[in-house]
Amino acid sequence: TDTEDAEAEGEVRLYSSREETALEAGELIWKKEGRILRSLGGPVKLRKDDGSVLEGRDLEVDFRRRRVTFTGGVSGTIVEDDAGTDDR
């Protein structure tokens, strides 16, 4: 489109080799102007290569601020690295 916005639905799966993270959702909406990726209420799973897993609903990823927000609840496990540092 002219805006470069996008919508995807079904079994949507994305993988970022830079972030070493996979995202699975039933539906996602990308808004290029704000660099925002959103789900529409369905379940979402984030899985990092280190074994961390977060599952929740109503996902918003703000790529400008590098922030992930679940407004519909979230549960999961975060694996900390051995050095105690944050590799983000």
Image (cartoon, helix red, strand yellow):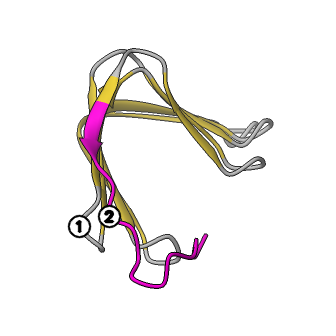
Residues shaded magenta: 75-88
Nearest the eye: 76 or 5: 76
Residue type for callout 1:
Gly
Residue 19 appears anywhere in the view: yes
User: Counting other residues with Cα less than 10 Å from the Cα at mark 2, is it few (<14), some (14-19), or many (20 or more)?
Assistant: few
The answer for how far apart the CA atoms under marks 2 and 1 are is: 6 Å
> Which label number is shown at residue 51?
1
In the image, residue 49 lies at what x, y percent? 29, 73
Q: Quadrant of the N terminus?
A: top right
Between 74 and 19, the residue placed more toward the observer is 74
Q: Residue at x 57, y 76 (%)?
A: 85
**Image quarter of the C terminus:** bottom right
**Circle 2 is placed at which residue position?**
79
| Residue sticking out furthest to the bottom | 83
Where 15 falls versus 37 (above or below)?
A: below
Find out whether residue 36 is within the magenta segment. no
